[in-house]
Image (cartoon, helix red, strand yellow):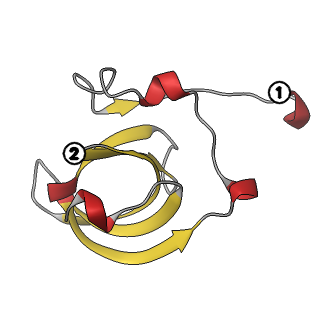
């Protein structure tokens, strides 16, 4: 896959190639940013952490779901900056909201 196959603020159901074992695994992701070699996405079917997913790990796009503006996930722009992701492959963050009583 390539950068042009993806869009920002879109949910995808993907088939990913596991880098260690080479096995194929399903993944539900929400794409925040697209860079030349990888995308930054939230794993919506797992723990919800941000991940760097190289395009060459994506074997197949099973489903594409555009997200309307009122349903989009927001993350501070500093956490999506390319220089932060040069040395890391994942980022776990905890957020709270006064509206949710946390």
Which type of secondary structure does the marked residue at label 2 adopt? loop
Instruction: Please give the label number shown on residue 102.
Output: 1
Residue 71, horizontal then vertical, whole percent:
71, 56
Q: Is residue 41 left or right of residue 37?
A: right
Q: Residue at x 35, y 33 (%)?
A: 90
Q: Is residue 81 left or right of residue 37?
A: right
Does label 2 or label 1 sit earlier along the sequence?
A: 2
Q: Residue at x 44, y 38 (%)?
A: 50
Q: Is residue 72 left or right of residue 57?
A: right
Up-down relation of residue 86 to residue 53 (above or below): above
Q: Residue at x 34, y 68 (%)?
A: 14
| Distance Cα–Cα, label 2 vs label 1 | 37 Å
Residue 92, horizontal then vertical, whole percent:
47, 29
Residue 32, horizontal then vertical, whole percent:
47, 46
Task: Please identify the quadrant where the N terminus is shown.
Answer: bottom left
Which type of secondary structure does the marked residue at label 1 adopt? loop
Residue that lies at the very extreme toward the bottom in this rendered image: 62
The answer to which quarter of the image holds residue 16 is: bottom left
Task: Please identify the quadrant where the C terminus is shown.
Answer: top right
CB under 8 Å between callouts 2 and 1? no
Neighbour tally class for label 1: few under 14, some 14-19, many 20 plus, Cα within 10 Å: few
Q: Residue at x 30, y 27 (%)?
A: 85
Residue highlighted by disc 2: 36
């Amino acid at each position: 896959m390539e950068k042009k196959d993806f869009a920002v603020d879109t949910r995808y159901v993907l088939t990913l190639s596991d880098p260690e074992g080479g096995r194929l695994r399903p993944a539900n992701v929400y794409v925040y940013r697209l860079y030349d070699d990888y995308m930054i996405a939230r794993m919506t079917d797992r723990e919800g952490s941000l991940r760097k997913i190289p395009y060459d790990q994506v074997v197949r796009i099973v489903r594409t779901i555009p997200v309307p503006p009122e349903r989009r996930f927001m993350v501070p722009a500093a956490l999506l900056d390319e220089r932060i992701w040069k040395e890391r492959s994942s980022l776990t963050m905890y957020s709270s909201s006064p509206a949710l009583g946390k």
